[in-house]
Amino acid sequence: MKNRRIQQLAATVVAAWLMGGTVLLAQAPEQAPAAAPAQVAPPAPYQPKFAGDPARSESEAQALGYMRVVLRAQKEYKKRHDKYAESLPALAGTGSLTKRMARSTDRGDYSVGFRTNKDGFILAMTPKQMDTEHRSFYAEEDGVIHADDQKAADLNSPKVK
């Protein structure tokens, strides 16, 4: 069974290699039409992922999604252990927060900030470049996400709807 899978994989690789060579031969340089000047299309407007989606861009949607996963994991962790996790790696494996998600503080256009305090925690998502499509986000153990497009978000920043 294992040998058959290996044979199927090898056949697929060889077929892909042969097809790639055929495509390259069909596109000989002397027959290729002159390339038109590249035109940069404006980025498509953000398409909300669900009704009431507060994100303004794909990057914000990903940052907010990450925050929701961490907040749900902390809530579940608290139910199990009667305290909040002291670090993201300690939270890994709770809910849908994976070890990989907990290990990396680099989340594309955002950096994750996490720290604990006496009775809870603070979670922040800071954009690498703040602009209208990259707000900063902040949440504590109450689960309310705050956003700010001018500075680092904090407890006094407007709530994300």
Image: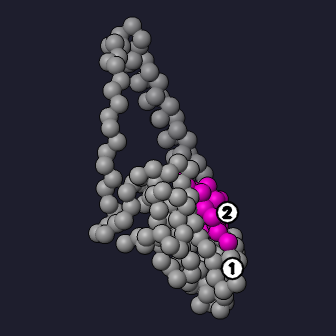
Identify the residue at image location x=48%, y=69%.
Answer: 157
- Magenta stretch: includes residue 124: no
In magenta, the rendered stretch is 96-115
Q: Is residue 99 in sight in this rendering?
A: yes
| Amino acid found under the numbered disc labelled 1 | Asn
Q: In which quarter of the image is residue 36?
A: top left
Q: Which of marks 2 and 1 is nearer the N terminus?
A: 2
Amino acid on which the number 2 mark rests in the picture: Arg
Q: Give the structural element (helix, strand or loop) at label 1.
A: strand
Count of labels shown?
Answer: 2
Q: Does residue 4 appear in the picture of this structure?
A: no
Q: Residue furthest top?
A: 30
Q: Which mark is residue 103?
A: 2
| Residue 37, position as x, y percentages in the image | 34, 19
Residue denoted by label 1? 117
Q: Residue furthest left?
A: 51
Left or right position of 126 against 38: right
Between 68 and 119, the residue placed more toward the observer is 119
Q: In front of the other: label 2 or label 1?
A: 1
Seen at 57% across and 66% down, the residue is 124
Residue depicted at x 52% and y 65%: 153
- In-image side of 100 versus 45 (left or right): right
